[in-house]
Image (spheres, helix red, strand yellow):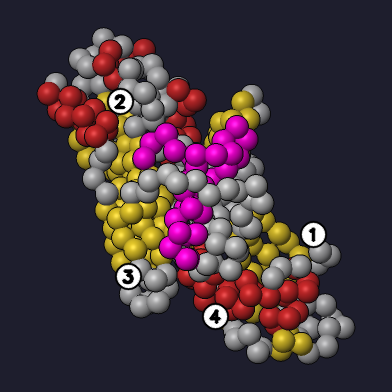
């Protein structure tokens, strides 16, 4: 980390730097200044400048802009792909593709990005193979640069940029919370009120680091808007709209208000709450093998056309069957 700069890694797929230009700094092109100051490839910096994800005083500038003492600069650039990432010929469910991006439907059970105990078989491994075989080069030796993620056992839509400028343009929308992300979930009980906003800061649970927990005074800001779509004796189908994109956000927020997701063992959703244990269908619900959560809708401004695009993915077979069984009761 450099002196005079604040650095953060998002829960999505990008890094954010905030820095103030030193009082003694002589005029210098911003792309050269940031490449040297941050130790990042100049191609990444230039792509971010073209996409508007690098700003001075809150305003986008051109790569030829000369930095001045006191300039407040914010930089949003991709996280580098892991060096150990290897290509794997894993089938992809591609819902849309153009020269700038892919829309992928990720099945439940697939990890998005390599990590502890999951170094192969991930969506990133599959994308790396796809990029190589289709000669897609995002300036990182064909390695994909992910801009957001969903949990292993959550199904649904992801947008994957094909090049640095597309990544930078999308990353700014994620950072500004202007991306439309709606999820469908089945939760225990009936949320009251049936529609509301949950604003609870999230941090690692001190008793279980694999789980996130709502804290009143520390952690990352997290906002989830939910509304009830259908109710059943023991459960409800809800839609959640994310304003922020924190790790396990919907899972932790719904547990916090007493309505964990069906099948979510880590957040207490693998068993019905005591008042619901004898409700019709409760016994069947506790056998659902994963958190009942699906990334249903994705909307954003396209990096090339600058027009809003919108994608939806129906419930996968397992969740559709779960909802159909609940409707029978």
Q: Rounded to the nearest whole Å, what is the CA distance between mark 2 and mark 1?
A: 47 Å
N-terminal label among 2 and 4: 4
Question: Toward which corner of the image does residue 255 lie, by quadrant?
Answer: top left
Pointer 2 with pointer 4, Cβ within 8 A: no
**Eye-nearest disc, 2 or 1:** 1
Please identify the residue farthest to the left as the structure is shown.
Answer: 328
Q: Which mark is residue 1?
A: 1
Q: Quick one: SS at disc 4?
A: helix
Q: Is residue 286 found left or right of 145 in the rendered image?
A: left
Which class describes the residues within 10 Å of circle 1: few (<14), some (14-19), or many (20+)?
few
Q: Earlier in the sequence, mark 3 or mark 2?
A: 2
Report the residue at 33% width, 22% height from top.
288
Q: Which mark is residue 50?
A: 4
Return the mark for residue 308: 3
Q: Is 328 included in the stretch rendered in magenta?
A: no
> For this rendering, which residue is in front, 129 or 251?
129
């Amino acid at each position: 980390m450099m002196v005079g700069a604040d650095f953060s890694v998002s829960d999505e797929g990008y890094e954010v730097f905030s820095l103030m230009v030193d009082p003694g700094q002589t005029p210098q092109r911003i792309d050269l200044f940031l490449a040297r100051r941050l130790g990042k490839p100049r191609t990444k910096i230039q792509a971010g400048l073209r996409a508007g994800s690098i700003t001075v005083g809150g305003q986008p500038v051109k790569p030829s802009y000369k930095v001045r003492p006191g300039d407040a600069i914010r930089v949003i650039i991709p996280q580098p792909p892991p060096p150990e990432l290897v290509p794997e010929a894993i089938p992809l469910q591609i819902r849309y593709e153009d020269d700038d991006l892919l829309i992928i439907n990720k099945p439940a059970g697939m990890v998005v990005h390599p990590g502890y105990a999951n170094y192969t078989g991930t969506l990133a491994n599959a994308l790396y193979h796809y990029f190589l075989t289709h000669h897609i080069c995002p300036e990182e030796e064909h390695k994909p640069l992910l801009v957001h993620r969903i949990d292993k056992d959550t199904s649904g839509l992801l947008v994957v940029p094909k090049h640095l400028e597309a990544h930078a343009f999308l990353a700014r929308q994620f950072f500004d919370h202007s991306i439309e992300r709606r999820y469908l979930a089945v939760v225990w009980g009936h949320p009251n009120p049936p529609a509301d906003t949950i604003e609870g800061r999230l941090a690692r649970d001190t008793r279980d680091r694999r789980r996130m927990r709502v804290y009143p005074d520390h952690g990352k800001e997290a906002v989830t808007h939910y509304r009830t779509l259908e109710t059943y004796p023991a459960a409800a189908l809800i839609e959640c709209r994310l304003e922020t994109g924190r790790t396990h956000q919907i899972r932790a927020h719904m547990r916090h208000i007493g309505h964990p997701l069906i099948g979510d063992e880590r957040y207490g959703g693998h068993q019905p709450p005591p008042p619901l244990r004898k409700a019709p269908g409760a016994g069947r619900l506790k056998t659902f093998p994963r958190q009942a959560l699906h990334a249903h809708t994705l909307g954003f401004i396209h990096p090339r056309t600058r027009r809003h695009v919108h994608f939806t993915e129906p419930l996968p077979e397992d969740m559709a069957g779960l909802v159909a069984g609940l409707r029978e009761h």
